[in-house]
Amino acid sequence: MSKSQNQKLKLLYMMKFFLDESDEEHGVTTQQIIAYLDKNGISAERKSIYSDIEALDSFGMNIIKRSARPTQYCLVSRQFELAELKLLVDSVQASRFITEKKSLALITKLEALAGKHGARQLHRQVFVRDRVKTMNESIYYNVDFIHNAINSDRQISFQYYDYTVSRKKSFRRGGAMYVVSPYLLAWDDEKYYLVAYDPLSAQKRHYRVDKMVSISVLDAPREGKEIFSSLDAAKYDTIHFGMFSGEERRVTLRFASRLAGAVIDRFGGDAILVPDGEEHFTVSLSVVVSPQFFGWLCGFGAEAELLSPKETRQEFEKYLREITSLYAPGNGE
């Protein structure tokens, strides 16, 4: 029998067929394989299929023979287990920085890794529509540009914007380019932030990556290395709240005992909780003091108290007075 023009692709087509059509619960027969190969212009005999399956199994595809009529062959393991793919799909769906369009595209690619039978289970979990998502489609490329700049020790330039009440972009600095030295990408409250050195203020600054456009990697080397030399990247987003800038301080907080889990979730298992009577505990932590930190404390109501330092407690009291003044009798009527 003369070999077809695509004969050299035979094993690759067989691999694709197993990945698409088979899993632990769904097998394929030699006749189905032969029909698929023929459809793609490749001739095959039954005996050659047996040896090709052995070759694919030896390669690491983990194909088993199942006794049935007719005999079936099952691909019983994949690079990603279905449970792992479900986790990735859930993460994509939950991520607000990924646009709806990109979310659906990524989920489609993840479904392809599960084969057609597993893809059905993943597809049933797709609930992307009507979820609040970012509107900046370029964020994926922004992240790539920033990583490249960090790895190559280069500065970047970009434009930075906010939204107006009418949902239009309003560029800061009149649309002028920002030039900064990038050092860290941080994830906080479902948003990506760039932590960079700003030469105009000679300080660390945070920038929402989804609000950055026209990013370019420059030839100039990064500045501000002395400021970032002691930066603990693993703990950076723990002490910052909403990536607001401020002064880092050691504070002592007092919580109701039932909030131990909330404190550990926020600050990690290294936080030392000291019992304070039967119904409370205290904890001393380093945090960046900002309105966002005060807002986090307010979320616990009277079950959380900022004990020290004195000046930070006074700042918190002022913050609370400014809020309560809005609701004083006669206001808002």
Image: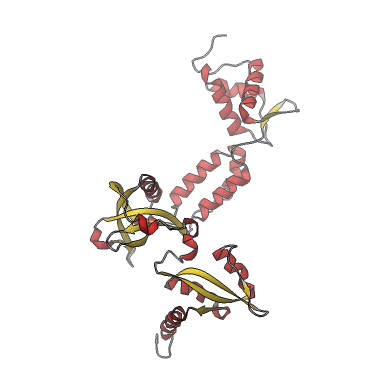
Q: Residue sitting at 63 percent across and 33 percent down?
A: 22
Image check: 164 left or right of 70?
Answer: left
Q: Position of residue 104 (x, y in %)?
A: 48, 47
Q: Can you say whether 313 is above or below 220 in the image?
A: below
Closer-to-camera residue (221/206): 221
Q: Position of residue 285 (x, y in %)?
A: 52, 69
Residue most toward the top? 1
Q: Position of residue 189 (x, y in %)?
A: 48, 62
Image check: 135 left or right of 80?
Answer: left
* Model colouring: secondary structure
Q: Can you say whether 312 is above or below 71 in the image?
A: below
Closer-to-camera residue (149/211): 149
Closer-to-camera residue (26/169): 169
Q: Position of residue 200 (x, y in %)?
A: 27, 61
Quadrant hosting residue 38: top right
Quadrant showing the N terminus:
top right
Image check: 141 left or right of 241?
Answer: left
Q: Is residue 327 visible?
A: yes
Quadrant hosting residue 191: bottom left
Quadrant showing the C terminus:
bottom left
